[in-house]
Amino acid sequence: MVVSFCHSTPQETAQQMINLRYILIFFLTLVTLTLGYAQDARLAQQYFQNGEYEKASELYESLYQKNGNNDFFFDRYFDCLLALEQYPDAEQVLQKQIRRDDGNVRLYVSYGTLLERLGRYEDAEAQFKTAIDKLPADQYSVTRLANAFVTQTKYNFAIATYEKGGELLRDERIFSYNLGDLYRRMGESEPMIRAYLNAMDDGPERVTQLKTIFQRTLTTEDYQELQTQLYDRIQGGNDNPIYAELLAWVFIQRKDYRNALRQVKALDRRFNENGMRIFELGQIAAEDKDYDAAMQAFDYIVTDKGQASTLYLDAKREALRVRRLKLVEGYAYTLPELEELEGQYRSFLNEFGYNKATASIILELAELQAIYMNKLSEAIALLSEMIAYPGANPNVQAGGKLALADYYLMQGDIWESTLLYSQVDKAFKEDILGHEARFRNARLAYYNGDFQWAQSQFDVLKASTSKLIANDALDLSVFIMDNLGLDTTTTALQMYADAELLVFRNQFEAAFLKMDTLATEFPDHSLQDDILYLKAQVYRKKRDYEKAAALYQEVVEKFPEDIRADNALFALAELNEKFMGNTEKAKELYESLFIDYSNSTFAVEARKRFRALRGDNI
């Protein structure tokens, strides 16, 4: 405001000065009142939070009287009266407020809450219904009333509020997401899923959020319900592509990758995509060891998309990798099957060349030849060339050196093995690859009978950042320590190390013969539990789970105090959970492990798996 004194008479100037003084006094008074008002509000809030309801009620009553339009001050004043059990006063002020502001339907919820305190449950329910009956056709009012019911955990009335609101606003789906949330709180899966799907139909951008909710909420049976409702919508003529996408996601959650593949293929064709959905599904299926579904996914990209696809090379490489995994993981392959797979690898390399870009495929082919086909010389020749490719990925080259060292070890060339391990150790000193090289070098020393040096290296590796390497190092360190000082000779330990090397070479019959000889010649040696455990490991590799489980059980029962007991218990639990379909037995074994072997390196993982099997929301 600008006040001009120009061209004014003395009397006018004096009057203007008086007016300016009154204006300043008014503003100062307003500021003072506002500051005091805000101070009282903060103090009342502090009293309320501290549970000093009597002091808070006095301030909130004053604030409410000064500003009757402020719902917050009234609500807090009313809450204070309830906390102080001053029910007659609470009812009186509430009735007065209802007469004053009858359009505020939330007041009827407060009245119902008060009546419940007084044990007048039928009257309380009547007030709740009155609130809904008087609901105006206004989205904000609907949401506020529903939230008032939710605050009092009156979920059924909150649902009724949203349903009435949808009728009033002539939009049955406007509150679908809110309804889904309420049904979720009540644990009613079928209407929850329906409401959430309605919300997603009107807002496809919600799909990611709903997937997160479903993952946290749905049980196996609930996923079946979700699948059924999605099918009903799709078959009912709803062509919203988000349903097909969500249906594929449901199949993935249920680990039904073949049906998931059918859905993503349809989406790929519908949107004329490059196959990325299918490629990603293949990776998920492969990770979950559904190799057939993974191969179908990758083969689809290779055959249907062809060489023009940017994913052609990757898909062909992944298809090859999955075929190898499917064949060799079971240790139940035949030589013709291995030769066919070897031919597929060579066909790939003939198509794309032997170069730095295909170095990882060369590494896989060498593994196939060395570990499974007894073609050590060919594998060594392949890797010797691969690790010399200029510009190749250093990590792939290092992996090639580690594998090459292993194959030299299989041939008995210890010098070449330790040289290559040491090269990787030096080049990747603080990296996981370096730790792996150091571990394998120490294991080589263990196979070769240099037990004390090997143990000193394992002791260092117990601090590795790789949990797997650290646990394996700890396991071998304790094992050597436990068996070194028992005899004046290391013959028994050396025989066991020889047996382990034979298992490493997949020469199982020779390994069993070595272990049987050890058990016969040293019947009282502490290695008896280790022999049983190693045999169980071999049977597990061969997928003979019944024999493996029997041997693990024998270790646990006969040698509960020895170092293999917790290993065997964890392995037995894992077999029951993942391969034998006995989750109750697995849960029992995991619980036994983290209770009876609380210091075991497996204890934390066992507790985690136990809680998952119990159904905890981890």
Image (cartoon, rainbow, N blue to C red):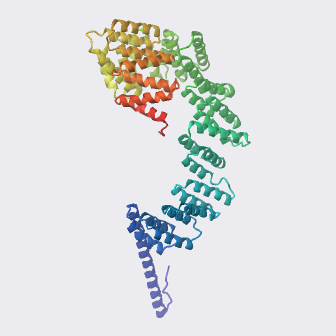
- Asked if residue 18 lies left or right of residue 318, the reply is left
Which residue is farthest right?
237
Residue 492, placed above or below residue 125: above
Viewer-side residue, 166 vs 8: 166
Q: Would you identify the image quadrant in which residue 306 lies?
A: top right
Residue 366, placed above or below residue 257: above
State the image coordinates of residue 86 (x, y, percent, origin top left): 43, 68
Viewer-side residue, 74 vs 415: 74
- Asked if residue 513 lies left or right of residue 140, the reply is left
State the image coordinates of residue 133 (x, y, percent, origin top left): 63, 63
- Residue lying at 45% horizontally and 88% vertically, measured from the top left: 18
Viewer-side residue, 431 vs 240: 240
**Could one spot residue 512 in this view of the protein?**
yes
- Residue lying at 47% horizontally and 90% vertically, measured from the top left: 15
Residue 146, placed above or below residue 347: below
Viewer-side residue, 305 vs 146: 146
State the image coordinates of residue 214 (x, y, percent, origin top left): 57, 42
